[in-house]
Image: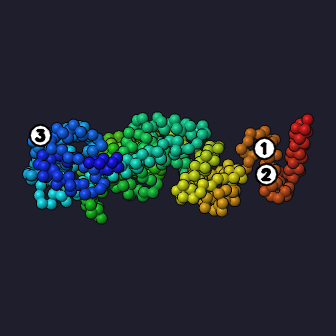
Amino acid sequence: MEKNEHNFLIYVVEDNEWYNKLLVHTISLNPDYAVKSFLTGEQLLSELTPDVKVVTLDYRLGDTTGAQLLPKIKKIAPQTEVIIISEQSDIGVAVDLLKLGAFDYIVKSEDIRNRVLNAINHVKNSIGLKKKIEILQTEVEKKYDFQNTIIGQSQQIKEVHHMLSKAIGTAITVCVTGETGTGKEVVAKAIHYNSNRKNQPFVAINMAALPAELIESELFGYEKGAFTGAQNRRIGKFEQANGGTLFLDEIGEMDISFQAKLLRAIQEREFTRIGGNEQVKVDCRIIVATNRDLLQEVKEGKFREDLYYRLFGLPIHLPPLRERGNDVLLLAKHFLSEFCEENKIPLKHFNDQAMEKMKLYNWPGNTRELKSVVELSAVLSDSNEISANDISVHSQELMPELLLHQKTMREYEIAIVKHYMKELNNNTKLVAEKLDIGQTTVYRLLKEDEELTDDLNNQNSK
């Protein structure tokens, strides 16, 4: 047997020499398969390694049986699949072997060759699927690594990272707060995919999108015949998230009439489907998010106090983008790189004017808006350089540069006047009307600015 590291390695164990050669010949017709044969179970165990993908195993060997050998094979090579080949069609024996971990049970017959090849092909496809799943899991874990998802170097984001590290170690309920577009669901996924529940479902539901009359059926499901149109049982979000994480987005929008049922389900970890009597037990972690002040909602009677304290758990607040300083540029560069890579276009970059424009913008839509603006700028740009003209934002949301620096009150007054002089084409009358001050005050502040500038120039020339 020529063993190639790229071959699919198969061991044949059969004490009938003619049948052994038949199986080896049949399997070897596929050039992707590397085959080695054995006449006894002892020979197999002496050479078995985890590299072997499949073992075809005769149920009755001279020195042992398939039932005795199967556990030993699994102990040495747990991932190796075993196909039992037997002369008897005893269903009970087949079931017992499948319970012990056999992949398939094939009775010797005229079509044995096709059946063996089909079984091996199923194993190969199964292994390929497992590899794809492992790759996807690795990609998901990388995608939701804190540093890759919650990007920034501001103190506020460092605090978010700190709280996230606390959240992943336990199953404590997490309450994520922040304005719309700050990335609350991204945080919820980062917690889930970095926790010990990462291989279980992550189920998200937006409470703001649900009419009050549909909340219970969406969360708890219903039985067949529970109401007109309920033709089959439906599993709710709680059951879908069993073992994993249930993310209740915009929890502050939930109708107060349903809040008592939600509280009970969370506390008791059980509920009843609509139209049913059976108590359904679930184990899912709860993460909630809101852009509202829930405590204020409690004071106004719009949110139950007992549910508030049950959900509050570990608080994680996401700051608005306008308060995060240079994080805007870090995020913009990340989104741009991501967009270029996904669309297979040459990597682009922002020029200084474009970056300054993004820094001056107020970003009312937060990171969600930034991502959309960056992607549009990459499309609008006619070269690898993105200019300020490619950054499409609302001019009324642009922050004056004066607010980005610490100044005295008088310096702020001068800067404000200069800002509006530029905006209004140096029309002092319009500036005075805009700021509700006298026109002489405008002249005086502009003169003070000239004097300050002259003083500064004189000091620098010395």
Which residue is under mark 3? 64
Quadrant of the rendered image containing residue 197: top left
Position of residue 167 relative to residue 252, above or below, is above
Disc 2 + disc 3, Cβ < 8 Å: no
Kind of residue sitting beneath label 2? His
Residue at position x 65%, y 43% from top?
A: 325
Residue at position x 8%, y 51% from top?
A: 88
Gap in Å between the C-alphas at discs 2 and 3?
A: 92 Å
Kind of residue sitting beneath label 1? Tyr
Residue at position x 44%, y 48% from top?
A: 139
- From the viewer's perspective, tell me whether residue 351 is left or right of residue 413: left
Kind of residue sitting beneath label 3? Thr
Query: Which badge, 3 or 1, is on the more N-terminal residue?
Result: 3
Which residue is under mark 1? 412
The colour style of the image is rainbow
Disc 2 + disc 1, Cβ < 8 Å: no
Asked whether 91 or 392 is in front, the reply is 91
Asked whether 336 or 347 is in front, the reply is 347
Gap in Å between the C-alphas at discs 3 and 1?
A: 92 Å
Which residue is under mark 2? 419
Residue 23 badge: none
Front: mark 3 or 1: 3
